[in-house]
Image (cartoon, rainbow, N blue to C red):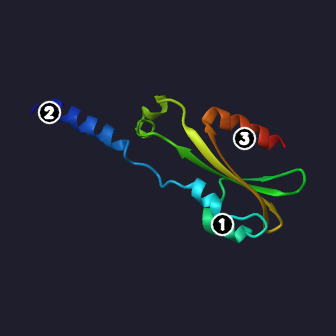
Amino acid sequence: MSMVKWFVLVSLGAILLSGCVHEPVRHLASDASLISPGASTKTDVLTYLGDPDERQETEAGAERWLYYEEHLSTAQRTLYVGRWFGPQSVSRIIVTFDGEMVTDIQYNASETGEFERERDKAGKE
């Protein structure tokens, strides 16, 4: 086998295998069920979900913690070319606190573009 053919085969194999590498995934849909408004505390939320991806203060003085999870297909996870394969979906949990106590929890999932519009709107509240 010539050196060029060997190089092409190894390169193609590396590109294909790079789609198999990914970061650990949160399971927000099931994790949301572990938190109960009026019963769970910040410590409970940190235990079940870890550090939030984003923290917000509302005008009313409440604190919100936001958690995000991206859902990507195998094609979307492929190194370099994955971004060309359709829209990704995103799940999120919004946990609202009054002091140390959870007062509200919301879970939703949406396409990326829809999520970005909602995120901008929530940041303006």
Q: Is residue 46 above or below residue 10?
A: below
Q: Residues within 10 Å of mark 1 (few under 14, many from 20)?
A: few
Circles 3 and 2 in contact, beta carbons < 8 Å: no
Which amino acid, by three-letter code, is at mark 2? Met
Sooner in the amino-acid sequence: mark 3 or mark 2: 2
Q: Quadrant of residue 79?
A: top left
User: Image check: 26 left or right of 22?
Assistant: right
Which amino acid, by three-letter code, is at mark 1? Leu
Circles 3 and 1 in contact, beta carbons < 8 Å: no
The residue that appears at 68% across and 36% down in the rendered structure is 116
Residue at which label 3 appears: 119
User: On the rendered image, what quadrant is the N terminus found in?
Assistant: top left
Which secondary structure, mark 2? helix
Count the marks. Answer: 3
Which secondary structure, mark 3? helix
Which amino acid, by three-letter code, is at mark 3? Arg
User: Image check: 22 left or right of 28?
Assistant: left
The residue that appears at 14% across and 33% down in the rendered structure is 3
Q: Quadrant of residue 34?
A: bottom right
Sooner in the amino-acid sequence: mark 3 or mark 1: 1
User: Image check: 42 left or right of 3?
Assistant: right
- Alpha carbons under labels 3 and 1: distance apart: 22 Å
Which secondary structure, mark 1? helix
Residue at which label 1 appears: 46
- Alpha carbons under labels 1 and 2: distance apart: 53 Å
- Alpha carbons under labels 3 and 2: distance apart: 51 Å
Coordinates of residue 66 in the picture (x, y in percent) = 69, 52
Residue at which label 2 appears: 3
Coordinates of residue 90 in the picture (x, y in percent) = 59, 42
User: On the rendered image, what quadrant is the C terminus found in?
Assistant: top right
